[in-house]
Amino acid sequence: MKFIKPKNDNAENVDWLVSERVRNLVKTYAEYTEYTESEIVNRFLLNLLDDRDFIAWIESKRNNRRIVKQLEIEGLVGDEKIG
């Protein structure tokens, strides 16, 4: 039996401007998947962590420990690259 894990999203409202097209896309995709619009945006944006160039950029930054901790990407960044 698989247990349901709590979301623990620590969600906050943000104030971003997006085009009407994007709002409609998120709304329609949420309807299709039966997720909330917030869950769609959250899941999609987490895909940014698959961008190896982005991770490499974080690794190259001096004193990147705070960024690595905030983004919870310790497993993606080598220990020797955290400074």
Image (tube, helix red, strand yellow):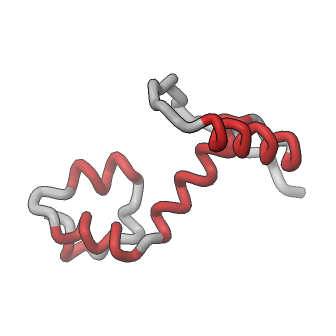
Describe residue 46's horizontal placement relative to residue 72 as left or right.
right
Q: Nearer the viewer, residue 82 or 41?
A: 41
Q: Give how far across and how far down residue 79 sits, in percent.
A: 25, 72
Q: Nearer the viewer, residue 9 or 46?
A: 46
Q: Give how far across and how far down residue 8 sits, in percent.
A: 59, 36
Task: Please tell me whether residue 36 is drawn above or below residue 79 in the rendered image.
Answer: above
Task: Please tell me whether residue 15 is drawn above or below residue 59 in the rendered image.
Answer: above
**Residue pictured at 84% horizontal, 55% vertical:** 2
Q: Nearer the viewer, residue 14 or 5?
A: 14
**Residue pictured at 53% horizontal, 55% vertical:** 46
**Where does the N terminus fall, quadrant-wise?**
bottom right
Describe residue 56's horizontal placement relative to residue 14 as left or right.
left
**Residue pictured at 34% horizontal, 69% vertical:** 55
Number of on-image labels: 0
Q: Nearer the viewer, residue 38 or 22?
A: 22
Task: Please tell me whether residue 53 is drawn above or below residue 28 in the rendered image.
Answer: below
**Where does the C terminus fall, quadrant-wise?**
bottom left
Image quadrant in which you'd find residue 24 = top right
Describe residue 39's horizontal placement relative to residue 67 as left or right.
right
- In the picture as drawn, the residue positioned furthest to the left comes out as 62
**Residue pictured at 53% horizontal, 36% vertical:** 18
Describe residue 14's horizontal placement relative to residue 53 as left or right.
right
Q: Give how far across and how far down residue 67 sits, in percent.
A: 27, 51
Task: Please tell me whether residue 25 is drawn above or below residue 12 in the rendered image.
Answer: below
Q: Give how far across and how far down residue 47 sits, in percent.
A: 55, 61
Image quadrant in which you'd find residue 60 = bottom left
